């Protein structure tokens, strides 16, 4: 007698948990997606606001820029240092700092 489970390959993992997929968000209906023909949600704001060309405020209207994403090599080294600190990783981190990364 074989078991029909996710571990045996007979049933998907999402089916074994009631058929829900935690990675999938709620379904969006066609009426919820804005269209170019919809009325503006900001009638007092110039359509060029945030663009550095034409009338209206430029880039400064959008506020401060988010920080640039961290160097992926640095992210990996930092994660490795958290898991298992060692002198070789420390030297690699120092090298990245010298390079400005």
Image (cartoon, rainbow, N blue to C red):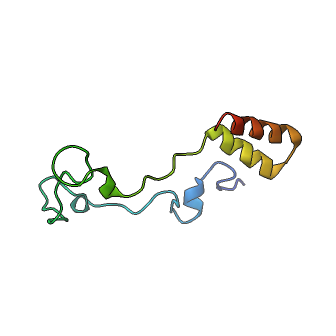
User: Where's the C terminus, which quadrant?
Assistant: top right
Q: Which residue is drawn at 77% across and 36% down?
A: 92
Q: Which residue is drawn at 58% across and 53% down?
A: 12
The spot of residue 65 in percent (x, y) is: 43, 52
In the image, is 101 to the left or to the right of 42? right
Task: Identify which residue, 32 or 51, lies in the foreground.
Answer: 51
In the image, is 53 to the left or to the right of 66? left
The spot of residue 64 in percent (x, y) is: 42, 56
The spot of residue 48 in percent (x, y) is: 19, 51
Compared to residue 89, the image places residue 1 above or below, namely below
Task: Identify which residue, 62 or 86, lies in the foreground.
Answer: 62
Q: Residue at x 75, y 40 (%)?
A: 93
Compared to residue 93, the image places residue 66 above or below, namely below
The spot of residue 47 in percent (x, y) is: 17, 54
Q: Residue at x 61, y 40 (%)?
A: 71
Compared to residue 38, the image places residue 101 above or below, namely above
User: Where's the N terminus, which quadrant?
Assistant: bottom right
> Disc count in the image?
0
Farthest right residue in view? 87
Asked where in the image residue 27 lies, by quadrant, the reply is bottom left
Task: Identify which residue, 41 or 32, lies in the foreground.
Answer: 41
């Amino acid at each position: 007698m074989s078991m029909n489970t996710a571990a045996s390959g007979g049933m998907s993992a999402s089916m074994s948990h009631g058929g829900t997929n935690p990675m999938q968000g709620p379904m969006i209906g066609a009426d919820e997606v804005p269209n170019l023909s919809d009325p503006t949600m900001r009638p007092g704001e110039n359509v060029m606001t945030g663009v550095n060309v034409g009338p209206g405020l430029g880039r400064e209207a959008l506020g401060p820029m988010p920080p640039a994403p961290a160097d992926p090599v640095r992210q990996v080294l930092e994660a490795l240092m958290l898991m298992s600190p060692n002198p070789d990783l420390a030297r690699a981190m120092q090298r990245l700092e010298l390079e400005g990364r």
